[in-house]
Amino acid sequence: MNLLKTASLIVLMTLVGRLLGFFRNVYVSNLYGTGMEADAFGIASTIPLTLFLVIPGAINAVLIPTMRGLLDKTDHRRAGELYHKTLSAIVLVFAALSIAGVVFSTQIAMLFGTTGEKLLLTAELLRWMWPAALFIGLTGLWSSVCNAHQHFFTPTLGTVANGALVLIAMYLLVPSYGVTGLAMATTIGYIAAALTMLPTLRRFGYLHRFAFSWKNDEEMKSMGERVIPILIGAVIAQATTFLERGFAGALGDGKIAALMYANTIVQLPMAVFVGAFTLPLFPLMSSYVKRGEMGLMKTTLQKGMAYLWILLLPVTLGLILYAEPLITLIYKRGEFGDTAVVWTAWGMIFYSIGLYALAGRDLLTRAFYALENTKTPVIIGAVGIVVYLAVSWLTIPWLDHGGLAFSASVSAAAQLLLLFICLWRKIGNPIAASFAATVWKATVAAGLMSAFIYLADPWLSVLPLWLYLAVGIIVSAVIYGGVLLLLREPLVKEVIGKLLKRSAGTQRV
């Protein structure tokens, strides 16, 4: 399956899954606005969400290169043995983590600075969410095995199953259990995401057996040595989320929820486009590194970075320029009033600034993992936390909770720059002159698109809100794409050419 076809499939499935998750947040905002219940749910859901962002990626980073090496040698028996041992380790570790989380839920809730009624509610929600940790671990293992076989559909289908089951469970449980029903539904969604992959694993011939003979297994030892710094790095990368919850809670009720709602919108393009390129690119880069084909590895990395710039730059500007109208259209109903709109839009503007930095950071981190260098991302992640704390201290007095979102963006940008410098020193310049040309062309196109949004606003703003946004976004996209075509951007022409070729082939069939 070529990169464009794989990316398109992942984009489609991830988009559906994220839209379902997005509707979940709209439902929560309608019920609780930026009230205490929304804050408690935002804090509690941080735990499974962080595990979901950290654990699958860490397992993916160590298991795929090892599994790919075995599959390239057609050593399927050894690949099966490795799966059994990894399954055993993950079940033991994450079952213990789930139990410990349930037992210490109150103490964990206290770490976020919650007190009184909010503390009790947050702890209750955590007790319902911690069992999801076991299924998040299994999701990481099973998605990694699928990806090692160059199969990306089922893991992304798991995202759809997650979103769909959460929505269904919410509508069934919340009327009876209130905000606790949200926590129950969240756990049900993670269970669905994991179980969706079982038929595909069976098709690849994997049996779910336990094997505990880890001691003399070189592959297990190697993965264990590499996964520890990867986990540390991933936890460090997500540490800003926990710091943000604590800092935002100190700014008053509703700020945690406002940042949660804002980040949900910003994470939608992040998940769609970053997932579309980091998932299929990582196995490719790992294979090139294993074969010593560093030129192909760098070409693949550059193309991913260029695609992300083309896709995320207009999204960034659109989210900034249309922040308040978007929030109003999406969330303003029920308990979500004018104040909540202003708070959420303010956070979204500053989160949006860091979109490309976050995406580029994740892709460069995967490049280091392909090189089996797990220490550099950890060190740079630690630097990112220092940057986050420093910028937060400087900007919160001026920007309130927007300072927290801005700090996250600046931290991501600093990490992207440092990763790029370190990668250059390790393998030479990872990008060619054509990347700079792509950046320039996309920037010009995005500038003209932004000028249209600004100049046309007085005329378009008289339209109904949904029509105002629809017309503005569609025309802006046409302007952006049209300018790139006029400037003869090869990546855009390549995508359009492949789409037309596929369309023609479909018609012939």
Image (cartoon, helix red, strand yellow):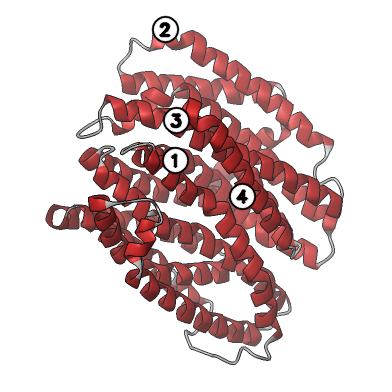
**Which mark, by number, is residue 263?**
1
Q: Which residue is mark 3?
A: 400
Q: Residues within 10 Å of mark 3 (few under 14, many from 20)?
A: some
On screen, residue 122 above or below 262: below
**How far is disc 3 from disc 4 in space, using C-alphas?**
34 Å
N-term mark: 1 or 4: 1
Q: Position of residue 387 (x, y in %)?
A: 63, 42
N-term mark: 4 or 2: 4
**Which mark, by number, is residue 458?**
2
N-term mark: 2 or 1: 1
Q: Quadrant of residue 149?
A: bottom right
Label 2 SS: helix
Q: Which residue is mark 4?
A: 277
Q: Is residue 315 visible?
A: no
Q: Nearer the viewer, residue 492 or 454?
A: 454
Q: Residues within 10 Å of mark 2 (few under 14, many from 20)?
A: few
The amino acid on which the numbered mark 2 sits, given as a three-letter code, is Pro
Label 4 SS: helix
Q: Position of residue 183 (x, y in %)?
A: 28, 58
**How far is disc 3 from disc 1 in space, using C-alphas?**
16 Å
Q: Position of residue 148 (x, y in %)?
A: 61, 69
**How far is disc 2 from disc 1 in space, using C-alphas?**
28 Å
